[in-house]
Amino acid sequence: MGQILFKRTHNPVFKEIDPDEFNTVFKDLIRSKREELTNPDFLQAYYQDNSYEPVFVTDHLFNGDITMMVNRYRRAAEHGLDPKIFQPDEIEALAAKFSGNTSIKTKEEAYRVIAKLELLTANSLLNYSNDLQFGLVPPRKIYSRYFIKTLRPDSISMGRIFNIDDMRIYLDSIQPKDPEYLTLQKAYLEGYEAPKLSKEETQRILLVNMERARWKNKPEGTRYVYVNIPDFNLDVIDSGKSVLNMRVCVGEGRNKKYLNNLVNYNDTCKVDNPFPHETPLLNSVIHSVQVNPIWNIPRSIATKEIIVEAAKDPYYLANKNILVYDQRGRVVKDPETINWSKITKENCTYEFKQQPGETNSLGKIKFLFENRSSVYLHDTPAKDAFHYRMRAVSHGCVRLEKPLDLAHTLFSDTVKYNRIAKDMEEDEPTPEDISLRPRIPVYITYKTCWVDQNGQLQFRGDVYGLDIVLYDYMKKYLPTGN
């Protein structure tokens, strides 16, 4: 190290460098700066395993690579990021100390400058690489109902910064290249103003959706079911194209009147506090359907709605084809004789199951996939809601406008599909489970701005307030004025 630095700078101080003394200084610096590092454990482990070699100073300082890095940092606003978070000025000032043969006057100063430049450069490049490739924030950190598989940086991906042969190729390789991201980015840089939105609000919507586009949570495979909550729509995607589109109803949201937006929101919106009925964000695999399903009514719905209606009308349960079960699992023969006005959330010991038929809240079919929230895609007898513009009206599951069309798309013209269609027309329906092979991935996600199949930007309201939660977290990383 000392020979390399002397040869490049002709500063005799570097002849005096002792590796063990430098290691002690560098080790102490890493320890003292832990709170300022984004990934302190990774950096500490790497340098410890590699004898505290200052690889950025020896391999990338004198060939212009660090200058190239700094120049990229200064263009971070192209991605909606504040260049200052990557500390280009500080890196440039430290690098300048190596430009002459007298800037560093003592061995002790040399140790400090080398260590500071090395650590600052490594930390900044690690942050820049992670932010562009994986996004600023892990979505699970800010969203309480986020269950989509999302890759985050690991030791392998982060270790790439220490094995760069060509800095320009590396910096180019980590730039987001997804076509949707590039379209959002172009609109952001050109100051696009969406119809019926201010320029400021448009820019912020673009920023949060650029961040979502950086998350590594995109659908895998060529064929999948895709639900975008703010759009209240479902698509079946095959080889990049929608082969089926329909309206859906999703869970009731906290911001369904759109009173809060990215320009005007109150402090209570900053932290994710879901309305009880909001549909979770998830990915799973549709493995089967149940035709003419029985609805096992959740206790929360039973105690808030079913017993209330039963208290108003003793024949409500019979009219809705709902059976009542006692604590021992036996059917209550005459539920209309129960004084439901005396039954409360606290003392209710009954369970309720709605039988198959025209009044069943799940309609004639539901599509099943594993998830921790017990939600599914299903038919509904309440068709009027599909004509609403704001369709966040369900208890959390996704109601389908055209469930038979979805079954046809997933099962094709098979014996199983024919059985589904026939069973859904039965006058005396009975439940039947039918497996789907091959299984089909399903993604329930959240985008308030995206690029449609015609290349046009689409904007939707922030019905769950998730833009606000994300934007408020991102603010510290954004350029001034955004």
Image (cartoon, rainbow, N blue to C red):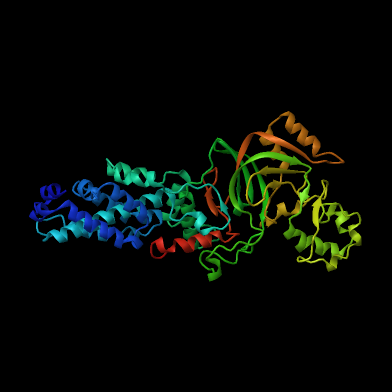
Residue 2 location (% of width, % of height): 14, 50
- Who's the residue at 48% across and 49% down the image? 213
From the viewer's perspective, tell me whether residue 283 is left or right of residue 397: left
Residue 430 location (% of width, % of height): 82, 41
From the viewer's perspective, tell me whether residue 13 is left or right of residue 111: left
Front residue of this view, candidates 271 and 250:
271
Front residue of this view, candidates 247 and 343:
343
From the viewer's perspective, tell me whether residue 1 is left or right of residue 239: left
The quarter holding residue 364 reads: top right
- Count the numbered circles shown: 0
From the viewer's perspective, tell me whether residue 290 is left or right of residue 132: right
Would residue 353 be seen by someone viewing this image from the given angle? yes
Q: Quadrant of the C terminus?
A: bottom left
- Who's the residue at 34% across and 44% down the image? 160
- Who's the residue at 30% across and 52% down the image? 122
Front residue of this view, candidates 360 and 234:
360
Would residue 443 be seen by someone viewing this image from the given angle? no
- Who's the residue at 20% across and 48% down the image? 58
Residue 410 location (% of width, % of height): 66, 36
Residue 464 location (% of width, % of height): 59, 59
